[in-house]
Image (tube, rainbow, N blue to C red):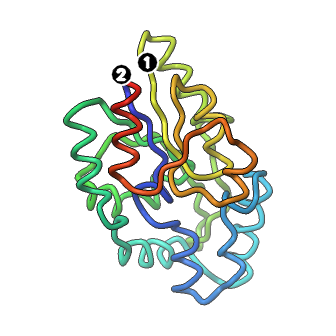
C-alpha cells in the first residue's frame, strides 16, 4: 500500500495565497480550488508576475517564511510509520525546497520552472499532463494498492484513479460536485480513513 498526498492544502498552506499576501497582489490568490483549468491558471499567474515585477527569488523568499499546516508534520510521520508515502504536487521543485526541509524531506513528485535571464518565471514545465493521475496509475501497474488525499480540482483525477480517494478540507463546491469521495477535516480523520481502507 502506498499513500499519495497532495501538498498544498493538505500538508502546507496554499503557496500562491501566501505569495499574494506577501506581495499584496490580490490576483495571485486564485488557486486550483477556484480554477479547474491548470494551464489557464498558470498562464494568468505568469502574466501577473511579469507585470508586477515579481521574480523567482521574491517567491522563494515568501515561501521560506511559511510553515507546514498545524499538525501536518506529526500526521506525516504517523502515516510513514504505516505506509510508504509520496507527495504528488503540481508545484515546482524551485518552490518546494524550503517546505520539504520543514517536513523532513518526504518523497516529492512535482514539476519544474523555466527561468529567464532576468530571474522571471518564463514558463512552467509539466513532467507530464495529469501527472498526479499518471503517477497513481503507474504505481498500480507496479502492483501497489494506492490511497490518495487531496483538496482541489487538480486532485480529482488522482482520487478517481486511486483504490481509495479521500478529500481533505475541500471547498464546499468540490464536496458537492464529487460526493463519491469521503470528506475529512482533521488529520486524525484522514489517518482513520486510510487505516480503514487498509
Chain-order first, disc 2 or disc 1: 2
Image location of residue 86, percent across then percent down:
38, 36
> Along the horizontal axis of the image, is 5 left or right of 48?
left
Q: What residue do we see at 57% from left, 86% from top?
A: 23
Q: Quadrant of residue 99?
A: bottom left
> Along the horizontal axis of the image, is 129 left or right of 170?
right
Dot 2 corresponds to which residue?
1
Answer yes or no: do the residues labelled 2 and 1 have beta carbons within 8 Å? yes
Q: What residue do we see at 60% from left, 89% from top?
A: 24
- Most distant residue in the bottom direction: 24
Image location of residue 71, percent across then percent down:
29, 61
Say if 43 sits above or below 176 in the image: below
Q: What residue do we see at 46% from left, 61% from top?
A: 95
Q: Nearer the viewer, residue 107 or 170?
A: 170
Dot 1 corresponds to which residue?
145
Q: Residues within 10 Å of mark 2 (few under 14, many from 20)?
A: some
> Along the horizontal axis of the image, is 121 left or right of 83?
right
Image location of residue 50, percent across then percent down:
70, 76
Amino acid at each position: 500500500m502506498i499513500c499519495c498526498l497532495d501538498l498544498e492544502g493538505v500538508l502546507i498552506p496554499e503557496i500562491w495565497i501566501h505569495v499574494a499576501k506577501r506581495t499584496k497582489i490580490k490576483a495571485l490568490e486564485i488557486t486550483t480550488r477556484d480554477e479547474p483549468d491548470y494551464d489557464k491558471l498558470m498562464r494568468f499567474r505568469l502574466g501577473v508576475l511579469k507585470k508586477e515585477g515579481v521574480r523567482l527569488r521574491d517567491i522563494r523568499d515568501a515561501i521560506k517564511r511559511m510553515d507546514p499546516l498545524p499538525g501536518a508534520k506529526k500526521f506525516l510521520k504517523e502515516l510513514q510509520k504505516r505506509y510508504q508515502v509520496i507527495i504528488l504536487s503540481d508545484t515546482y521543485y524551485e518552490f518546494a525546497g524550503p517546505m520539504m526541509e520543514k517536513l523532513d524531506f518526504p518523497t516529492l513528485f512535482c514539476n519544474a520552472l523555466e527561468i529567464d535571464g532576468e530571474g522571471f518565471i518564463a514558463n512552467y514545465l509539466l513532467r507530464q499532463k495529469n501527472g498526479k493521475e499518471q503517477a497513481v496509475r503507474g504505481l498500480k501497474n507496479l502492483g501497489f494498492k494506492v490511497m490518495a488525499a487531496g483538496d482541489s480540482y487538480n486532485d480529482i483525477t488522482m482520487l478517481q484513479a486511486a483504490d481509495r480517494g479521500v478529500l481533505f478540507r475541500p471547498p464546499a463546491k468540490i464536496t458537492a460536485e464529487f460526493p463519491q469521495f469521503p470528506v475529512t477535516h482533521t488529520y486524525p480523520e484522514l489517518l482513520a480513513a486510510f487505516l480503514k481502507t487498509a
